Image: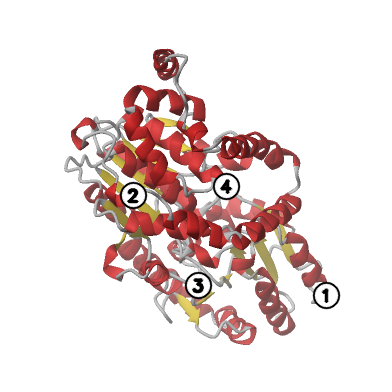
Amino acid sequence: MAPEERDRLDAVGAAAGPNHVPISVRIGLPSRIVASFYAWARPYARRLLPLSVRHRFSGAARFFDRVGTPSVAAAFQARSVPLANLAPALPAERFDGPVLLVNNALAWGGVERQIVNTLNGLQNRLGGEQTGLLCLRLGADKNYDFYRSALTHYRGTLRNVITLDEAEAVLSKTVSPARLSEIEGGISWIPPGPREEVIRFLGDFLSLRPKVVHVWQDALSVSAGIAARIAGVPRIIVAGRNVAPVNFAYFHPYMEFGYRELAACAGVTMLNNSFAGAASYARWLDQSVDRFLVLRNGIDTAIIAQPSPEDVSGLRRRCGLPEDAPVVGSIFRFYEEKRPLLWIEVAALIAARRPEVHFAVFGTGPMQQEMLRLARRKGLTGRFHLPGTIGAPEQALALMDAFLLTSAFEGTPNVVLEAGLLGVPVVATEAGGIAETIEQGVTGFVSASATAVELAGQVLAYLDDEALRAAVRTAAPEFVLRRFGLDRMLDETVGLYGLSKVVRP
């Protein structure tokens, strides 16, 4: 946080006086204790516990959370006022500040890549218009800052949201006690952790007065989206970047009720990056699909460009890949929804037909050891490579003769677009928005059956036919640029924000 912002918040806190009673305390001391414990323990757990242990603990937490679903539903039904009926804390004309994007951090992932593309692109296009990114966990771990270096030349706000105490000070200065009580009644149903986030974002929004708030992923779409609506931000975008969260391990029951609250507010734009994702959310929330807008991803060709042969050869050596070996590869997080074990089953079938082929999957995640064990059982030792994450995905993709993705659930996977941009044929399962990223039979193949036999057969078809691969090298980049060009994405984003001044780079 900038020193001047810190000084201003200190002054607000002093003005609140000794009799100030924080809203989170008035909601209930036990909730405040639980939220404070979570806030204290979370960074230590993320730094000190191995990924596999953290995954098991999070799984246990999700179990108990789902067991408590009826109590969350009851608390939601008992709220004193629906979000749509809450009067904004400030009138819309008071929000003349920056365009704010909100996300958990800048970790390794496709969403974060799109955030970087958007922030850098808007900075070049919007003249004097101010932009910013508020996060929860920047600096908590090196993994959370993975893409921070991509914003080296970004001049806007880039920091974590203010603390709970700072937010309480802003609220006590800005909002009357009667309004605080009304807000309390509207958010008391939210569990302690996300409720703390609502308060923190609410305080920051009342301080910064953004004209636009664009939240990028499910958990924060709920907490920061609700906070923006309570504050009175005139233009609010909450974005799902995949199919509905109920399909994933990170899902918590409160998310459904939070999304329903937001969907009921006329001034909130519900966004997705694929038509398949929008339809999934619509079914989940019993909404018309027309309630959702689709804004497709944008690929930055200045970053994803064909690497030099020297860079590719160097990576090949570091990965232990023979210089002349065909490579089937992928880039994904090693989580259940990506079906990494199916990926290895497919690899084993390919290996049985083509013993010279090697396999390389770039990424990390809690299923890594399971993947290695299965690869050994399938006889892939020495031919199956897990090099870890990579900051230059174009180098990894340039290694590959075919790209294989076996996900059960997806939004719009950037890596499929990047493979297409580099002319690498893609074989993938029909999951979420994947079919929208491939021109069937032209740039790749999408399997509706998701069987290892069919997927392996399609990969082998590309490995066995140089002319087919050459056709993809021509067709795929044209398709990706036509449908997922960065200029098109930025133009649509500026329109979504209601900003008319566009300065071309």
Q: Is residue 408 left or right of residue 385?
A: left
Callout in the foreground (4, 2): 2
Sequence order check, earlier mark of 1 and 2: 2
Tag 1: amino acid = Arg
Give how far apart the Cα atoms at labels 1 and 2 are.
Answer: 54 Å
* Crowd band around label 4 with a 10 angstrom C-alpha radius: few (<14), some (14–19), many (20+): few
Tag 3: amino acid = Pro
Identify the residue at image location x=66%, y=75%.
342
Tag 2: amino acid = Leu
Q: Looking at the image, which is closer to me, 296 or 307?
A: 296
Callout in the foreground (1, 3): 1
Q: Looking at the image, which is closer to me, 83 or 434?
A: 83
Residue 332 visible, this angle:
no
Callout in the foreground (4, 3): 4
Judging by the rendered image, the residue that carries numbered circle 1 is 377
Sequence order check, earlier mark of 4 and 3: 4
* Quarter of the image with the C terminus in it: top left
* Crowd band around label 3 with a 10 angstrom C-alpha radius: few (<14), some (14–19), many (20+): many
Judging by the rendered image, the residue that carries numbered circle 2 is 83
Judging by the rendered image, the residue that carries numbered circle 4 is 391
Sequence order check, earlier mark of 4 and 2: 2
Judging by the rendered image, the residue that carries numbered circle 3 is 425
